[in-house]
Amino acid sequence: MMRDYGKMTPLQAAGCVRERRRDLKESRRLTDTPGAIVATARKLFEQRGVRATSIAAIAKEANVTRELIYYHFANRNGLIEAVIDDYVEDLVESVIVWNEARVFGDTPGSLKKCIQTFRYSLYDRAGRPRPVIAVLEELGVRDAFDVRATRETADCLANHIAKEYAAYHRIEIELVHEMFCVVIFGLVGLVKMNPRIEDDVLMKVIEQTLRLDMAPLEAGEG
């Protein structure tokens, strides 16, 4: 069921707390006409900037009427709210896709791919920020977005993926959700401070912070 968009400011939308996902198959991305409108708004926000993009321009690019946009999103802030939700979904879905592609027992390989998934969702291989960063900064919501994205990603990791890990390894840390938040915030800060930091360095930071068991497992072990 589609949420009632249009009751929050961009700052409130970037910092809102949503219910935790019941399972990793649950998608919160809008589909059909609302999804197409959001995708078009994202594209134009990233190309032209938020302030320079009118609802009329979005309607023209999406080949819909302004009235149809306002049918699905009560006002301009409602559409911005949906775009912010979509950005969060990008990050959480990237973790879900990474989890589905993991090879059993290959903790080092899985961790390396996790690092690549994380950093290249925010920065390109030359260390340049993705367009989403400019949109969030123009809206003045990047810090609030970082908190929300960290919380929802940590929920996904702690409530689902860490439980799978615990079936075959001893978890050596307490406060698992909080430690995931520390790691995610730390990675964001490190990459922001040094966009060219090596993946192997980030891997070592995660390994040491979470005290991961890096020994490979064979099928049937555990």
Image (cartoon, rainbow, N blue to C red):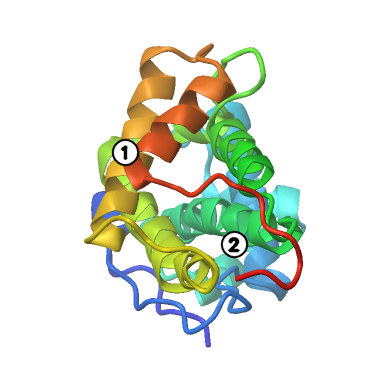
User: 58 left or right of 218?
Assistant: left
User: 126 left or right of 85?
Assistant: right
Residue 7: x %, y % from top left:
29, 70
- The residues tagged by marks 1 and 2 sit, at their Cα atoms, a distance apart of 39 Å
At 73% from the left and 48% from the top, the residue drawn is 61
Q: Is residue 35 above or below residue 44?
A: below
Q: Is residue 77 above or below residue 219?
A: above
Circle nearer the viewer, 1 or 2: 1
Residue 49: x %, y % from top left:
51, 30
Q: Is residue 216 above or below residue 164?
A: above
Q: Quadrant of residue 96?
A: bottom right
State which tag comes first along the sequence, 1 or 2. 2
Q: 36 or 113, which lies in front?
A: 113
| Residue 10 in view (yes/no) | no
Identify residue type, mark 2.
Answer: Arg
Label 1: element kind: helix
Q: 57 or 187, which lies in front?
A: 187
Identify residue type, mark 1.
Answer: Phe
Q: Is residue 193 above or below residue 1?
A: above
**Mark 1 crowd level (few <14, some 14–19, many ≥20, 10 Å Cα):** some
Q: 172 or 73, which lies in front?
A: 172
Mark number, residue 185: 1
Residue 161: x %, y % from top left:
52, 66
Residue 62: x %, y % from top left:
73, 55
Q: Residue furthest bottom?
A: 1
| Residue 103 in view (yes/no) | yes
Q: Quadrant of residue 26?
A: bottom right
User: 168 left or right of 187?
Assistant: right
Q: 155 or 220, which lies in front?
A: 220
**Location of mark 2 (residue):** 66
Label 2: element kind: helix
